[in-house]
């Protein structure tokens, strides 16, 4: 087997060989610890019958572990300077496809048709660029990719928000947007020392597993997310106050909002952070006719 990319010495060698300097603006914090990488990949439960989609391969530290475990790896890298590096470091693996581009602009559905048509089991596995974690996750979810789930590293604070339960400080519209599609759990915490350069924030890996069915049937998913976002605008305010301000003409239609809340069994003086996704879903259905 090849020597791992993710050791401090080999990483330094590669950076030096290519005169590579990190771009903070692209969230470039590379992993230099093989144990962490093995651990991340093991959470994805991949086999040679699976494929992995990676965002931001960097110099290929995680990519090579994925290539050894999965049947196929497709990785999107925005930084052109890394393309020759990846061509070199990943040359021992013939099952990796590097795509140069911004994942936020990518047509990933097309990749399923062109490259992943033989794979029924696909996972997203990535050490995400932290500056765009949320847009990337939301984009991948909204693209409705037929993935089993995602194992992704991010800033711990965002991981806490994504995996939060109702009634906790971290729970909010991001928890709802993600947990509507996926079951979410923290897989592991990751110390700063395993990155080069070390990030300023703590990191965690989360595991998302696609739900067979959403937890609640809604008329319009976008409207559910609008209602949930509108319920958290001022966290300390009651849900009725927040919805009055956030729904179109909400102030004039206060009575209608109260009626909808009461119909779904939600006391208007509760705060948004106490409502489950099911309650938000039912509430959005009640409000839909009047406010969508
Ligand atoms: N996977 C590597 C590792 O773990 O060592 C690198 C991870 S580093 C945290 C994030 C990577 O994402 C960088 O290589 C960066 O250039 C890339 N990146 C940043 N923004 C991106 C975007 N919008 N689309 C694709 N790749 C991006």
Image: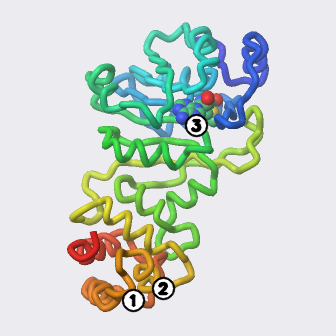
Q: CA distance from mark 1 to mark 3?
A: 41 Å
Q: Is residue 36 visible?
A: no
Query: Do callouts 3 and 2 mark residues in contact (Cβ within 8 Å)?
Result: no
36 shown above or below 73: below
Which labelled disc corresponds to residue 80? Answer: none
Q: Nearer the observer, disc 1 or disc 3?
A: 1
Dot 1 surroundings within 10 Å: few (below 14), some, or many (20 or more)? some
139 left or right of 13 in image? left
Q: Earlier in the sequence, mark 1 or mark 3?
A: 3
- How far is disc 3 from disc 2 in space, using C-alphas? 37 Å
Residue 175 lies left or right of residue 120; in this view the side is right
Q: Residue at x 44, y 23 (%)?
A: 73
Left or right, residue 279 beside residue 153: left
**Quadrant containing the N terminus in the rendered view:** top right
Q: Is residue 174 visible?
A: yes
User: Which residue is located at x 41 percent, y 76 percent?
Assistant: 275
Q: Position of residue 157 (x, y in %)?
A: 63, 57
- Identify whether 220 is placed above or below 99: below
Q: Tell whether label 1 touches label 2 (CB within 8 Å).
A: yes
- Is 116 located above or below residue 242 in the figure? above
- Disc sitting over residue 238 in the figure: 2
Work out which quarter of the rendered image holds the C terminus and state it. Answer: bottom left
Residue corresponding to mark 1: 268
Residue nearest the viewer, comparing 41 with 146:
146
Mark 3 CB near ligand 1 (8 Å cut): yes
- Sequence-wise, the earlier of marks 2 and 1 is 2
User: Residue at left 61%, top 11%?
Assistant: 84
Residue 126: x and y in percent read: 53, 35
Label 1: element kind: loop
Which labelled disc corresponds to residue 127?
A: 3
């Amino acid at each position: 087997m090849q020597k791992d990319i993710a050791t401090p010495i080999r990483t330094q060698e590669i950076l030096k060989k290519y005169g590579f300097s990190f771009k903070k603006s692209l969230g470039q914090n590379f992993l230099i610890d093989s144990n962490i990488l093995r651990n991340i990949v093991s959470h994805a439960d991949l086999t040679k019958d699976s494929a992995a989609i990676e965002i931001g391969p960097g110099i290929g530290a995680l990519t090579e572990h994925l290539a050894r475990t999965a049947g196929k790896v497709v990785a999107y890298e925005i930084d052109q300077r890394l393309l020759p590096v990846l061509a070199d470091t990943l040359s021992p693996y013939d099952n990796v496809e590097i795509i140069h581009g911004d994942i936020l602009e990518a047509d990933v559905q097309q990749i399923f048709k062109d490259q992943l048509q033989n794979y029924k089991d696909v996972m997203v596995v990535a050490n995400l660029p932290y500056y765009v974690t949320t847009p990337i996750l939301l984009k991948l979810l909204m693209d409705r990719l037929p993935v089993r789930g995602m194992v992704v590293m991010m800033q711990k604070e965002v991981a806490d928000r994504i995996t939060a339960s109702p009634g906790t400080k971290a729970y909010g519209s991001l928890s709802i947007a993600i947990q509507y599609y996926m079951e979410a759990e923290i897989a592991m915490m990751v110390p700063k020392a395993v990155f080069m350069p070390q990030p300023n924030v703590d990191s965690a890996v989360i595991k998302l597993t696609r739900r067979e069915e959403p937890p609640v049937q809604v008329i319009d998913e976008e409207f559910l997310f609008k209602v949930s976002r509108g319920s958290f605008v001022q966290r300390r305010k009651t849900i009725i106050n927040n919805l009055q301000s956030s729904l179109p003409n909400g102030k004039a239609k206060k009575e209608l909002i109260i009626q909808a809340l009461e119909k779904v069994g939600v006391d208007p003086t509760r705060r948004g952070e106490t409502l489950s996704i099911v309650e938000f879903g039912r509430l959005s259905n009640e409000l839909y006719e009047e406010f969508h």
